[in-house]
Structure formats: C-alpha cells, structure tokens
Amino acid sequence: MTTTPKLELFRELPSVDEVMRKPALAALLEEHGAVVVTDAARTVLGRLRAEIASALLDSASLRLALDGMSRAIEEHLRLEVAYSLRPVINATGVILHTNLGRAPLAQSALRHAAEASGGYSNLEFQIAAGERGKRDIHVQRLLQKLLDESAKDREISTIVVNNNAAAVLLALNSLAEGAEVIVSRGELVEIGGSFRIPDVMAKSGALLREVGTTNRTRILDYENAINERTRLLLRVHRSNFEISGFTEQPSISELSDLARRRGLPLMEDLGSGALVNLENFGLRGEPNVLDSLRAGIDVVTYSGDKLLGGPQAGLISGRGDLVSRMRSNSLFRALRVDKLTYAALEATLLAYVKRDYDAIPVLGMMQRSAEEMGKRAQEITKQLILPKLKTEIVAGESVIGGGAAPSSVLPTRLLAVTCQDLSADELAARLRTSDPPVIARVEEGRVLLDLRTVFPEQDAMILRALRQIAV
Ligand SMILES: *Cc1c(COP(=O)(O)O)cnc(C)c1O
C-alpha cells in the first residue's frame, strides 16, 4: 500500500471560504449567521489538519471526511449553540429539588416576568408623580395583605434580596454588627450548598453566642447569656434535619416574652417559608411565615423558591422599624434583585391573594393524590409493552425537599422499571441522555419514576424515552 505524502493531503483541504460556499451550509448560515458557522468550519478544518499531521488519515479516509464536512460542521454547531441551562423532566418526586432548580414558576409568573422585562417598566419610577420610586414597593402591598392578619398592632414590612442566605446576612449585619447574637447549639445548621449559620454570622460581623446543648436548650439558657453586648435572639428552622428523643427547645412565645422583657428583637430564619398552612396540603409540622409572626417573631427570613413556590429570592418580613434599618444598609444595594424576580414574585404572591393555589406548581403537585399518580403510571405502562422492559407500579413516597423536614413526605405510586440488557444505573443514565433528559431515582436495582413532579404533558416524553431505550 502506497501512502500519500502528508503535503499532498494538506493540499486537498479546501479553504474556509470554499467550505462556506457549500450549498449544504446555506440553511445553517440562514439560521445562525456567518460568525458561528465560519467558526465551526474552521474548527472542523483544523481537526482534519491535525489528523493529517498525526498520520491518522490516508487519501481515502480524507475523501470520506471531506464528503461529510457539512454534517460535521452542523454537528459541531449544534453543540456550540446549544444552551447549557436546559429543561429536564424531574421524575425523582422531590418537589423542591435544589439541583433541578427548586420551584417551577407559575404560568402567570412567567408571563409577568416576560412583559416586565422584554421592555421598560416602572421598576423604580412612580408613574403618577413622574418621579423616582423604590423597587421594593412592588411586592410590599401584596405581602402586607397576606401577612396582615398576623400583624396585630404592628406594621409588617417586607424587603426582597437575592436568596435567603443573603436575607440572613443582611438581617444580622443590620441588627447586630459588632455585637452578640444568641443561638441554640441545636440550631447551628448547615443547609445544602454550604450555607452554615456560624459562617454567615461571621461574615455579617455579628458574634455568635451559642447556648444550650445539641439536643436540649431551655429558655433560661438564653436568659443567662444575655448581656450588654447582646443585640438579637435568633431562632433557626432546622430544615433538613430533625432531632428526636431527649430533646427540648423553647417555644416561640417563650422566646418572644424573653425578648420583650429584655428589649431585644427576636429573629427567625425559617428557610422554607410557606405562606399557607400546609396541613391543608397534607403536610404536618411545617411552619409558616404567618404562624411565626403571630407567635411573636419580630423578623422572619425565608426563601422565595422553596415552599412559597416563586423565583429564587430571600424575603425579610417583620417589624417596620427593623426592616427599615435593613433597607438603608448599603449591603441591601449589593444584594438586591432584578425586575425579573420582582415580576415573578409579584405574580406568585397575587395567586396567594386570590387563593388560586393550583396555579402555583409546587402547591399543585402537593395536592395530587397517590391514586392519581398510580393512574398516570398505569397509562404509561399500558403503552410500554416491550419484551425487554419490565414495569411495575409500587407504593412509595414523594419528598418535599428544599429545607422542609426530612419526614415531610407524601404517599405516592412509583413506576418501577427494569430493562433486560441494562443495569438500573445504566438505564437511569440512558434516561438522562434523552431529550429532554429524564432524571429518576435508582433503588434496589430498579429505576423509580415518580410522576408527582412530572408535568402531565411530559408523560408522553417519558414514554417515548423508555421506548427508544428498550427497542
Ligand atoms: C434553605 C435555607 C437557607 C438558605 O436559603 P437560600 O434561599 O437557599 O439561600 C437558609 N436557612 C434555612 C433555615 C434554610 O432552610
């Protein structure tokens, strides 16, 4: 076999200009413009040049490669212009899945974000007066309405920052910089994503004064720790862990009485701040913002994208004078949110005001019954009669997630799938390569799909993905 000298092979390579004139590229040029197509052509040519240089191509294989050039450019371009952030199907049954973007937004929130952001808006403008306004008034009115019944004789204000971690940072810095904050040892939690109470406290410039023990803290422990440097009592929702057995923790009203007597504010980091009583949604023991304020908390911090079901945000609601100090802190400027967030949050809050809970996806998902999940799973299995696949519907639990207690689960029915030629992990991996990717749980050698977190119109996509894998 004679080998063609490399120099001759190089000569067979077309120029970028020649490649760009190929009729097969016309449609790509039309869709994506010359810049990225030329770039892709250069990359593909460069790859061929490198392969010739390393003697990986002979004359015949080069010809083949040149014939397939347009396809190679198209393939490269497809990867190049694809979004990195893309939709997935959450079949894990974890409603507030932090890795999968937490709360999906209400349709009204999407529409309002689009209309408020595609053009100009009155983000910081008072239309009637024609003067500069404040961005935080946009959600204040609705929150006042929602939290009013908790207010008693107090004026409740709310401000919004980037997330709950930022809310805690801003609140601590505004209320206790250079002074002491008393927290129970049993509440020094770490939340997923490296939010640790002691670390945030340190960054805020406040000094952590730990009291009690991991499992038991009494009101007297707080009382004894109060001194002239104390500025704040802090209570933290344990969120993703629980302690049981020989435990003790003062109630909010005990803490509130103590705070009142000693002239100190009482703050609660609630984390997953529900705006409704979740017992109506099948969840016991999850605290909500109203109950905390009603029980005597002065300032509560909570996330917008956990049980509230809105966009990523941190909300700080509480006594007007305390919230005002946060509003005038220069940190607030650094932590403020964009019009997209205000718009999505405003629309989500409006759904609460209208009591239109079905419109908020996370609340809607909680309301689905196990039977309904079973029926949908049954529908899929009926259409999935493939020799390689074994499907079964089994009882299981959907998880709330997002800082709700680990025991906060809802009964569900799971679609359990095994595939003859694949391990459960392999099957789950293949589901992830579907378009859109399907994310599922793997347990005891089976792939488990929980349709509670799957939007009904996505059932057909799961069916298609399983069919493609098992044909
Ligand atoms: C989730 C959570 C946080 C962090 O909230 P982000 O919105 O993720 O920043 C802080 N504190 C508690 C108690 C939480 O549950």
Image: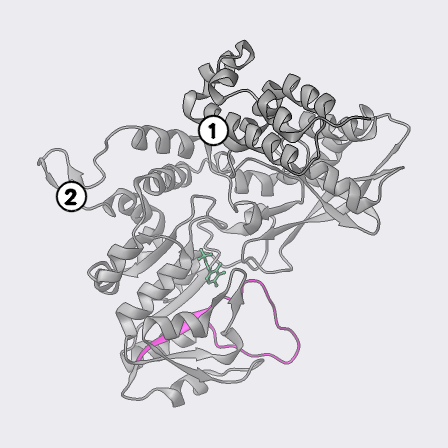
> Which residue is located at x 52 percent, y 18 percent?
19
Amino acid type, mark 2: Gly
Find residue 56 and report its horizontal and vertical position in percent: 71, 34
Tell me which segment is drawn in magenta.
231-252
Question: Can residue 82 be seen from the camera position used here?
Answer: no
Find residue 51 and report its horizontal and vertical position in percent: 65, 34
Could you give the CA–CA distance between mark 1 and mark 2, rounded to whole angstroms?
A: 46 Å
Q: In the figure, residue 131 lies in which quadrant?
A: top left
Mark 1 and mark 2 lie on one chain; the one further toward the N terminus is 1
**Depth order, front residue of 334/213:** 334
Foreground mark, 1 or 2, reads: 1
Find residue 74 and report its horizontal and vertical position in percent: 57, 22
What's the mark number on residue 133? 2
- 342 vs 174: above or below: above
- 202 vs 278: above or below: below
Residue assigned mark 1: 39
Q: Is residue 5 left or right of residue 208?
A: right
